[in-house]
Image: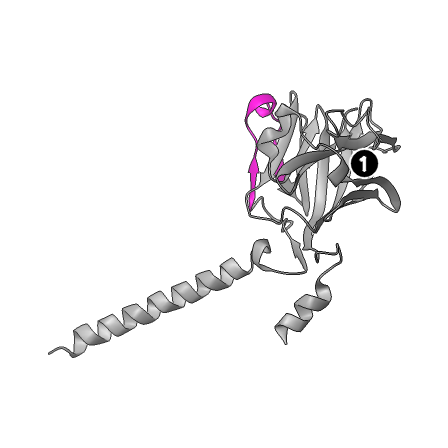
Amino acid sequence: MFVRPVLFVCVLIAAVSTAISQESKTDRSKFEDKFGTTAIFDGKSLEGWKVIDQFVFKRHGKVSVKEGEMILEKGGAGTGIVWQGKMPRINYEIRLEAKRIEGSDFFCGLTFPVNDDYCTLILGGWGGGATGLSNLDDFAAIENQTSNFVEFKNGQYYPIRLRVSGKKIEAWVADKKIVDVDHTEHRLSIWWEQEPARPLGIATWYTSAAFKKVELERLTSKGEATENEATENKK
């Protein structure tokens, strides 16, 4: 007479074990547990991202996904999204493609961690072409040693790379290196408006923009890619 209860318990245990196993596989697929490159935008949804609605983002524009693009429409003032997953605070690289649709201010404000601090890479600010880090020694992107200028055309995608290693912050627009600074020699900070974008966020300012192919890659302590290490770990 105990056959059915025992059978039920066995089936229940098997079901729970399967669920735990599936959950573990899902957890292991998250970026924080994986070496190498991981796409953090699937091209189909905002999964893993949250629309920022605090401070200057309260009157944000519409955020949507269409045909593989993440579209941030013009806000008053900012429109932004923040990554909800865990990520490295040092020795990593962020890659994405970004384009300005309309507007004349920054179409990509990329906030990112550097150990216990944060900084923002600005692309297209102050009239549409200024680039640099905000803030470096309390100076904005337009007034510190990383200040640069790139002529961004509306409707054109630009490959963006940001690399944070043990000593350096480096950034590229296509093949042009626009930032190369030893962060250990400077004080890093962000404007209060960008605080909701921590630890990793993308924002626009009175500007509409689109993004695709957003990726994160963990690097070794020497600032090198870990693809070979990841391959060895799978053997």
Report crowding for label 1: few under 14, some 14 to 19, many 20 or more residues within 10 A (C-alpha). few
Residue 35 rendering spot, x and y as whole percentages = 64, 61
Give the position of the C terminus as an image quadrant. bottom right
Q: Quadrant of residue 11?
A: bottom left
Residue 74 rendering spot, x and y as whole percentages = 68, 26
Q: Nearer the viewer, residue 191 or 70?
A: 191
Residue drawn at (63%, 24%), measured in percent from left and top? 193
Q: Residue tagged by mark 1?
A: 155
Whether residue 230 appears in magenta in the rendering, the answer is no
Position of 220 relative to 118 (above/below): below
Residue 46 rendering spot, x and y as whole percentages = 58, 44
Residue drawn at (33%, 71%), measured in percent from left and top? 14
Residue drawn at (57%, 22%), measured in percent from left and top? 55
Residue that sits furthest to the left in the current view: 1
Q: Quadrant of residue 17?
A: bottom left
Query: Can residue 109 be seen here?
Result: no
Q: Start and end of the magenta stretch? A: 48-64
Q: Nearer the viewer, residue 2 or 166?
A: 166
Amino acid marked by disc 1: Gly
Whether residue 55 appears in magenta in the rendering, the answer is yes
Q: Quadrant of residue 13?
A: bottom left
